[in-house]
Amino acid sequence: MKYSEQDERTSEWMRLALSKMKQFDIAPTPANYALWFEYVSGTNLSLTEAVDNEIEMSGKLTAQQCHLLYEQFFDDDKDRAAMFEMRQELARLLKQVLNYVYTGVTTTGRSNSHLQSMLSRLQPDLNRQQLHTLIEEVLIETRLAVSSGELLNEQLNGAMTEVAALKKELSDSRREAITDSLTGLANRKHFDDLIHQMTRDADQNGMDVSVIFSDVDMFSTINEKHGQLVGDQVLRVIAELMKTSLKGRDLVARYGGEEFAVILPNTSMQNARILADTIRQDLASKRIQRKDTREPLGTITMSFGVARYVPGEGVDSFLQRVDRAVYLAKRRGRNNVCDAPPPII
Ligand SMILES: Nc1nc2c(ncn2[C@@H]2O[C@H](COP(=O)(O)OP(=O)(O)OP(=O)(O)O)[C@@H](O)[C@H]2O)c(=O)[nH]1
């Protein structure tokens, strides 16, 4: 078989990807392989930058970091598809505007070269932030052209409206990607991103970061007795209650099925514990009814675990400790708040 230049390059990237995984002692799983293949091929500049940043910050790349990077760059097919469509749409609009320029509607060459350069920046590895910046630039450029009378107002106004709609679509899709659709709370991805960022900050400046995990007690019984839809309704009520108990930069997320997680920046262990207990009491005293029949659902409770991040312990240890605290609260009979055990450093 005769190898083409492309085949040779691909083989080289495969070799390099494997050697990188060996260098960082990373298991050669398909996900890790995809990550490193993309890295060594240099086709995704954002990914390369993200990997380099991680290595620069900690001098290594752990399996957990690889997992997060994989999730960020590969594991969100829907999001990637939406980004792809938006890139296509922006390219179409830019070409349309350029067309007006070519057909002589404009009198200067400024818009022409500027729009051309924007078009050339519409690369496949464009991330969400870069796409957002580009859309902003296109909006400014077209607005300028309209106001200076360079282009036919009517045609350009149409294009401008479409670019503005695209901008809204991008921010809607960004919100959707980090939101839990059942409760409207942040989703697990948002929680994971933020907790990594907060613990990194805490490692650097020692600020207080506390976390509350909570798990609905005997939730399967609610589902069995009243059905999944009523179970869903209960989750929404709890989400609402948790949201109204928080303030400022606190973040509450639906962490899993009937699990909720709260990040509390600049909050001591004691205050986190007080907050968890307030939510616990508020829920236990709430009279929740079925929406359809008004039938009371009885007392619904949750078990809580609380932990404060100890700088240097790492996010995995932190979340394992708080998870352990929820387990202890369940063991103590549920409807309880328990402190996490100290980290083993
Ligand atoms: N209605 C509904 N149920 C869910 C959802 N996600 C998970 N569940 C249910 O949540 C229940 C969790 O049950 P278990 O983990 O056994 O725990 P539990 O019954 O809450 O009991 P304890 O945690 O031990 O107090 C299961 O029945 C899941 O099917 C959801 O989105 N909607």
Image (cartoon, rainbow, N blue to C red):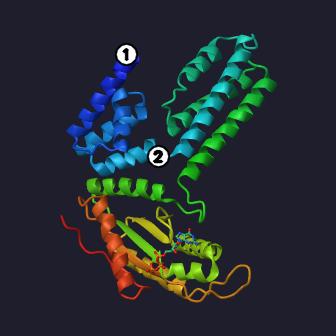
Give, as a three-letter code, the residue at label 2.
Asp
Q: Is mark 2 within 8 Å of ligand 1?
A: no
Name the residue nearer the viewer: 133 or 107: 133
Q: Quadrant of residue 155?
A: top right
**Vertical comparison of 195 with 213: above or below:** above
Q: Is residue 183 left or right of residue 311?
A: right
Q: Which residue is mark 2?
A: 75
Residue at (28% x, 29% y) in the render: 16
Whichever of callouts 2 and 1 sits on the residue coming sooner in the sequence is: 1
Task: Name the residue: 56% across, 37% down.
Answer: 132
Q: Quadrant of the C terminus?
A: bottom left
Quadrant where the image shows the N terminus: top left
Furthest-left residue in this view: 345
Residue type at the position of mark 1: Met
- Mark 1 closeness class: few <14, some 14–19, many ≥20 residues within 10 Å: few
Q: Which residue is mark 1?
A: 1
Dot 2: element: loop
Other residues around mark 2 within 10 Å, as few (<14) / some (14–19) / many (≥20): some
Q: CB at mark 1 closer than 8 A to ligand 1?
A: no
Quarter where residue 341 is shown? bottom left
Looking at the rendered structure, the secondary structure element under dot 1 is loop
Residue 308 image offset from top left, x and y in percent? 32, 69
Above or below for 137 versus 259: above
Q: Is residue 93 above or below residue 206?
A: above
Give the percent coordinates (x, y) of residue 232: 61, 72
Residue at the image position 31 percent from the left and 59 percent from the top: 315
Question: At which x and y percent is residue 179?
Answer: 55, 57
Q: Is residue 190 visible?
A: yes
Does any portion of residue 271 appear in the rendered image? no
